[in-house]
Image: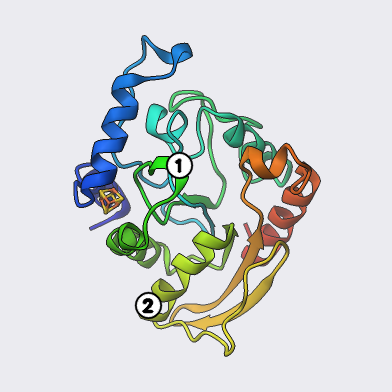
Amino acid sequence: PDLEVLDARLTGCRACPRLVAWREEVGRVRRAAYRDETYWARPVPGFGPADASLAVIGLAPAAHGGNRTGRLFTGDPTSDFLFAALHAAHLAALPYSHSRDDGQRLYGTRLVSPVHCVPPDNRPTPAERDTCRPWMARELDLLGPTLRAAVVLGGFGWQALMPVLTAAGYVLPRPRPAFGHGAHARIEGPDGPLDLLGCYHPSPRNTSTGRLTLQMATDVFRRAARLAGS
Ligand code: SF4
């Protein structure tokens, strides 16, 4: 299938009982500010063009962000931070991400999620991560011919990505590259080399404490854009 078909199939997935229950519960209870909204409350597909040369790999949709709006990194403070950095690196049309009809566009970049349903406490179990893995594997496989670089937002995404790359025929160096902010590894794959870059996750836990500043995130995206040729 092409990416659009894959995304449409994904939104009907109910393979993880705990996450299906949680995504629907969050959509039923709702946050006071969004009481009158209908939450998406389904798996959230990737966002960005099918011929992207750069993938940005997160963790899972946020309860009142992606799970509410139906688009990854959309509708909460984490989203606005991430898109401010992407915009500064000329990878996004707008420096914020509010809703699916806000006019946002990504240039040569696709947001990808290792887990597509919101988990309680933002913590998927290892079993849920593994159950969702084939979706990310298929998505990256479809991007494969154009994909040149990936920015991975946090250690969870980094760990989730490694077996996907191995299964897709990429040759990982030994020891395996470790996650860190600014980490960089070039790995050989069936469609040519892929540059992997690490960046702290733009959650409030990192951005409100100054562990991740806008300049730090922007620097990683600018470097990734150069490597990806996007
Ligand atoms: Fe399906 Fe992934 Fe959601 Fe589990 S997390 S229900 S595998 S889309």
| Rendered view: 155 above or below 122 | below
Tag shown at residue 168: 2
Q: Residue at x 59, y 88 (%)?
A: 175
**Quarter-wise, where is residue 186 in the image?**
bottom right
Q: Residue at x 33, y 24 (%)?
A: 39
User: Which quadrant does the C terminus fall into?
Assistant: bottom right
Residue type at tag 1: Asp
For the residues bearing labels 1 and 2, Cβ distance under 8 angstroms: no
Q: Is residue 121 visible?
A: yes
Q: Badge 2: how crowded within 10 Å, few (<14), some, or many (20+)?
A: some
Q: Is residue 48 visible?
A: no
* Residue designated by label 1: 121
Q: Residue at x 50, y 56 (%)?
A: 52
Task: Looking at the image, tell me whether mark 1 or mark 2 is earlier in sequence order.
Answer: 1
Q: Tag 1, which secondary structure?
A: helix
Residue at the outermost top position: 36
Residue type at tag 2: Ala
Find out if the beta carbon at label 2 lies less than 8 Å from the nearest ligand 1 atom: no
Q: Nearer the viewer, residue 230 or 114?
A: 114
